[in-house]
Amino acid sequence: MRGRSWLVLVALIVLVIAGHWLYWRSVERHLAVGFEVWAAELRTEGWAVTAGPLARGGWPLAATLALPQLSLEGGESDIPGGFSWGAEHVVLRVALLRPAALSITAEGRQHVRVGELPDLPYTAEGLEAAVPLGPIAAPHPADLLARNVRAAIPSGLDRTASLTVGFLRAHFEARPSAT
């Protein structure tokens, strides 16, 4: 009888691990499909969205999608001159215990351009956005956390000024325009 108890215990452990892996795989698959759908929707609106080969991971605590060389460019209909942003490495992460929240972390060298302003290269020790997933009523919220953002700002004749933001926490709400 004692040997049978061990067998049942081992079987239960295997079932729990298999169930956890299946749940992780499902969240990971939804994350990848969600990114592809989002990128396709932006492309139909005239945006250019590019990234290197996607890498899936995060087991056992989260589902992650690593996006090397992510770049977004477009928005000319909303912003005169458009908008451009890119980062060496972006990680999308959904914690398995919080499946309704998406964490977006940008790492490495980055750049941003708004309108006719020059491209602004910068680096950040940490740049993370948190957005809710799933259907939510407007306004659409997002939280931003930035640590040690360093930019070289052109200041005239072959000169640049340095700008460092030590810590920034912001909350945004996007309100769709009535059409």
Image: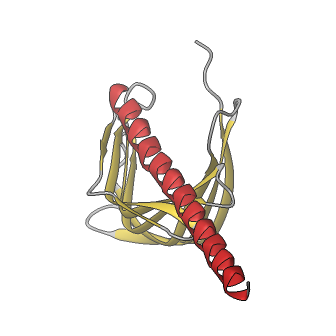
Which residue occupies 41% across, 36% down? 37
Q: Where is residue 4 in the image (x, y as percent from the top left)?
A: 68, 80
Quadrant containing the N terminus is: bottom right
Which residue occupies 38% across, 41% down? 36
Which residue occupies 55% across, 65% down? 18
Q: Residue furthest bottom?
A: 2
Q: Where 82 sits versus 9, above or below?
A: above
Which one is in front, 107 or 23?
23
Which one is in front, 52 or 118?
52
Q: Position of residue 172 (x, y in %)?
A: 66, 45
Q: Is residue 133 visible?
A: yes
* In-image side of 20 versus 116 (left or right): right
Quadrant containing the C terminus is: top right
Residue 156 quadrant: bottom left
Q: Where 84 sits versus 109, above or below?
A: above
Q: Where is residue 20 in the image (x, y as percent from the top left)?
A: 59, 63
Which residue occupies 45% across, 50% down? 29
Q: Where 74 sits versus 50, above or below?
A: above
Residue 161 quadrant: bottom left
